[in-house]
Amino acid sequence: MFSKLRDKLKNWTQGLIKKAIVEEVEKVAKKEKAEKPAKEKKESIKKENKKKFKEETQEEVKEEIKPIEEHEYVEPKQKIFDKKEREVSEKILEDIKIEEEKKKGFFKKIFSGINKIKISEEEFEKYFEDLEYLLLENNVALEVSEKIIQELKEKIVGKEFSKKEIEEKIKTSLKEIIEEILIEPFDLIKKIRQKAEPLANSSGSQNKQKNTPFVILFCGINGGGKTTTIAKLANKLKKQEISCIMAAADTFRAAAIDQLKKHGENLQIKVISHEYGTDPASVGFDAIKYAKKNKIKCVLIDTAGRIHTSKNLMIEIEKIKRVCNPDLKLFIGESITGNDAVDQVKSFDDAINLDGIILSKADIDEKGGTALSVGYITKKPILYLGTGQEYDKLEKFDKKKFIESLGL
């Protein structure tokens, strides 16, 4: 997920850093140019002093040389420099050292002086469109993109960072923003157990409420992997030793009933169904009734895939919700549909007030923005990700793991 965004975001960050450094280089270069005449004059005076000192020293050495007789050794008189002369000598050595430093190169000298860079608001605005495009390209909804960019701007604009830490700071900031956007998912298995466990040991004298199974109503459009995902969840419950049945409440499409029955046979889990065209709410009602009688802990109700823009179909699912009174209403959509999934989930949320989201086909989603978008728009948690066709390919959504997959 987000592999393309990760690479492009790195390029965007480097561009932002490069621009800030170039601006700093231009400032230093401009300063160097302004100070050049004064420096040249100073250098000229230094050269004059150096030449004069060298000539005076040579003259003094000549005066000290005396003729000697043959075979006579005379120890040469040592020149004793006074304090002023020593200071001049040390100054010459210092000037030589400075000249050597200059040989290292103008730009190296400039860059070594830039320890901190500051990204201005104007500079951030120049790259604003690029970042927004990167996010939109990766299925992040416009509303979410704007939030991410605004919060990133508040975290980095006008603040000083070292060249080494600026890229890490941007990545850390994005990570913090995404953590805030995604709602922490609840433990579905634990939720089911809390209500269903008393059911296993219930007796006729106990409260009627304790004899009620945990009911989950699923919704989504056709082709979103809804029926297969319900079968995956049924398999997960079975492995957790939580008994369940599936209700084929998609009575508008005969193939949907057959599909769910096939999954039931494969998993050895009972499917409650009626004839094609019957009232879907009655199928859910009968499934709950059967579960109560047989002390089955959980009922999974499949509903017809419906176009979210169809008013009549949305009214129908409201009726199913009203009749079955589910404990949870979950939306199942494809992670690869991008902004379409956002429109879908908003419509279903308005109709039945969703409690959570499951995204299918996450294994072929290279972008990952849909998870961010549906989570932010609905303020509802993502519970699972479908990661393949097999029944065990239903992965619990983990915020930390998801963010790590973004490379942040």
Image (tube, helix red, strand yellow):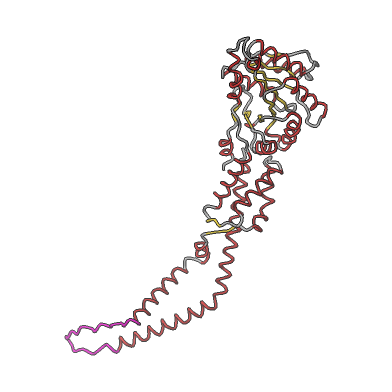
Residue 313: percent from left, percent from top: 80, 26
Residue ID at (58%, 56%): 159
Residue ID at (38%, 74%): 93
Residue 44: percent from left, percent from top: 48, 81
- Which corner quadrant of the image does residue 82 belong to? bottom left
Q: Main secondary structure of the magenta part?
A: loop
- Which corner quadrant of the image does residue 199 belong to? top right
Picture quarter with the C terminus? top right
Q: Is residue 240 left or right of residue 142?
A: left
Q: Which residues are magenta?
A: 63-84
Residue ID at (56%, 59%): 117
- Residue 388 is a magenta residue: no
Q: Residue furthest left?
A: 71
User: Is the residue 395 above or below the residue 30 in the image?
Assistant: above
- Front residue of 242/169: it is 242
User: Is the residue 376 above or below the residue 360 in the image?
Assistant: below
Residue 8: percent from left, percent from top: 62, 46
- Residue 82 is a magenta residue: yes
Q: Residue furthest right?
A: 312
**How many marks do you count on the picture?**
0
Residue 60: percent from left, percent from top: 32, 87
Q: Is residue 160 left or right of residue 271?
A: left
- Front residue of 154/125: it is 154
User: Is the residue 157 above or below the residue 67 in the image?
Assistant: above
Residue ID at (62%, 50%): 12
Picture quarter with the N terminus? top right
